[in-house]
Amino acid sequence: MAVVNGSGVNQSGVSRAGANLSGANLSGANRSGVSGSGVSRSGIAPRPVTTWVILGVVGLVFLIPIVSMIEFTLRGADGGYDFRHWAALVDPANAGKYAPIWRGLQGSLVLSITTVAIVLFLLAPTMILVTLRFPALRRPLEFLCLLPLSIPAIVLVVGLSPIYLTIGRSVGTGVWTLAFAYGVTVLPYAYRAIQANLDAIDVRTLTEAARSLGAGWGSVLLKVLAPNLRVGLLSASLISVAVVLGEFTIASLLNRQNLQTALFIVNKQDPYVAVILALLALLFAFLLLLAIGRVGTAAALRRTTPKKDPT
Amino acid sequence: MTNADMTDADMTDAGITRTNSAPESGATMRTTGSNPLVASGVDGASVSFRGVVKEYGGHRVLHELDLDIAAGEFVSLLGPSGCGKTTALRVLAGLESPEGGVVRIGGTDVSNVPTNKRDLGMVFQAYSLFPHLTALENTMFGLGMRKVKKAEARERALAALELVGLQAFGDRYPAQLSGGQQQRVALARALVTEPRVLLLDEPLSALDAKVRVQLRDEIRRIQLRLAITTVFVTHDQEEALAVSDRIAVMNAGRIEQIGSPEDLYRDPATTFVADFVGLSSVVPATAARGAVTIFGSSLPMRSPRADGEVEVLLRPENVRIATDGRGERATVLESTFLGSLRRTRLRTDDGLTIRMQHAADERLAFGDVIQIEVAADAVAVR
């Protein structure tokens, strides 16, 4: 049966997309730590054949699900291939059918913005404060921030649900309230990205230099530290967006609608459009992570390119 | 303006000599009286520490420090690491708050004034330029904080960069400058706001030996031109001796002695000072009628003592190789070639370790046995 079969493929497609998202996030977090350092061929690199075999196997692992998803979305009615499912997505006739997706997307975007705000205005200043004033707290903070990695989302929800009862009564049940939970789930990724950047600059000396030149704390943060933490803050933000866009478990169990839960619902009616959107989400996350790598290195390159002495 | 379209006139203007190297290795500073920063001058303020106490977790690093620095004076805080010299500077800068005592700048108690309101210029040991700003923008930073108009700030910053010989390097980012150039820009950045006090926290210790000497002399020259009160923290006695009006030798949170470089060198008050300033050897001797006898020579004492046992502080340059069998027998422990001279460590038959400075062509090697004596200069005793 075509529908059952399709649904099966689609299920694996969606979950694969989720796995890819978090995989990409991790590699993004690692990359931000070493951004700027060029890859150089050293004497200990494996032989070319080995290199290509490794690349080929890894490439296949990533490509097969993605290609399968693309293939699935292009299937026509009579066993051929066409773009009817892609076209159906923008067909006004289907607006009612796909409405949950747009609502979900809207919710996820609001959540992304709120979560990024938590990262930029709560986590980053806290980390700077710990670096400058309470260096002894660095390890405890790191432990705390990395903890969510080791707690499965489903376990997190068990602890969160009574809290969300209170939140629901006090500030409402709007989808944006999920940002409180997402602020916790993105901590490991955001922390790593910002900490790598903090380690790369001499926060204390820069701060003291700025203070000695007459800068107040606001100027220190905005004019001295923020520009030098730009890459870390940007990476943390984009990774957070990627995590939020790929989040399903917490939203589903707390009965809030975001992109992933909407996809799940629509998937039951029209598996094709769900896979199409999963592909688009994947592409978006990929572009985000690509942007992290690019934006920072351009400025760094401009600043470090040796100049000829004007002699 | 990019470097490519710099004309010769520009270069001459910037005071860069035409060598293929950065100013620190070949160029000279433009000696001009028309530099606006020099012309407007900096009104240095006096500084005083009164009973300043600083503790870290119960460990006392400053013991009721008293220190007075006159306006326009260049004072070095000299001592080994952990002696409290950097802490004293940081207390003055407001980067550390003392547990007790009073710090005054220009006669005003600044205990409750935060760093950014103390009107100081500071150069740090670590490279402290803002990496995202060019040399010129770095230099303009303090003026921006003081709400100086952009055009005026730019002009003053260029003048400050000219003062350190880096006017042509304004569009460089710190990562494009050498260590010595970065510290010069940091100096320009600290001076451009015409601060009341200039604080130098071991600004030379990360630099190569040659650059270190050049920048050291330049700091002193600029300080004299601007007549700015300067506190210079260093662990290098040679540096302190070369540039200071007065040196405060610190040890374990206290000032052991304060005085002019000459005073410290000739009349060290304690063994610690004698050892730290100028590598003295300590030799026990007996004083009798205003003189001591060491290695067969009778020497006058700089400050007379009662007869009895004393310790004599011997400068390396006052010890020399004896001829015709006079003096004391000693064995060479090590001998270091220092270009124009040699410095040799010896052990006498009595087990005393003696440092000697002598001509480079008198080659000594480990194990050589020689006779040494003391030049007939007056010596300091304790």
Image (spheres, rainbow, N blue to C red):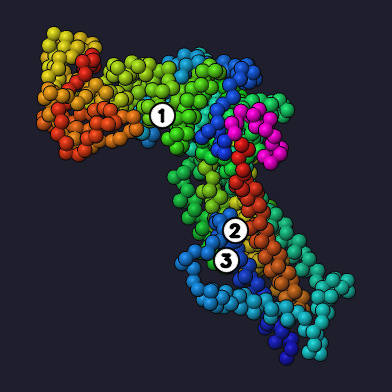
Compared with B284, A101 (above or below) is: below
Q: Is residue B15 located in the magenta-colored stretch of the structure?
A: yes
Q: Residue, x 35% and y 23% (percent of image)?
A: B249
Q: Amino acid at mark 1?
A: Thr
Helix or strand or loop: what does disc 2 sit on? loop
Q: Amino acid at mark 3?
A: Ala
Q: Residue, x 19% and y 35% (percent of image)?
A: B332
Q: Main secondary structure of the magenta part?
A: loop
Asked if labels 1 and 3 share a chain, the reply is no
User: Counting residues from the N terminus, which is met first, the one under dot 2 or under dot 3?
Assistant: 3
Q: Nearer the viewer, residue B3 or B80?
A: B3
**Drawn side of residue A251 relative to residue B326, left or right:** right
Snapshot quadrant of residue B29? top right
Q: Is residue B379 located in the magenta-colored stretch of the structure?
A: no
Q: Return the mark for residue A153.
A: 3
Q: Return the mark for residue B50.
A: none
Mark 1 residue crowding within 10 angstroms, few (<14) / some (14–19) / many (20+):
many
Quarter of the C terminus of chain B within the rendering: top left
Compared with B102, A71 (above or below) is: below
Q: Return the mark for residue A186.
A: 2
* Residue range highlighted in magenta: B1-18
Q: Position of residue A112 (x, y in %)?
A: 69, 57
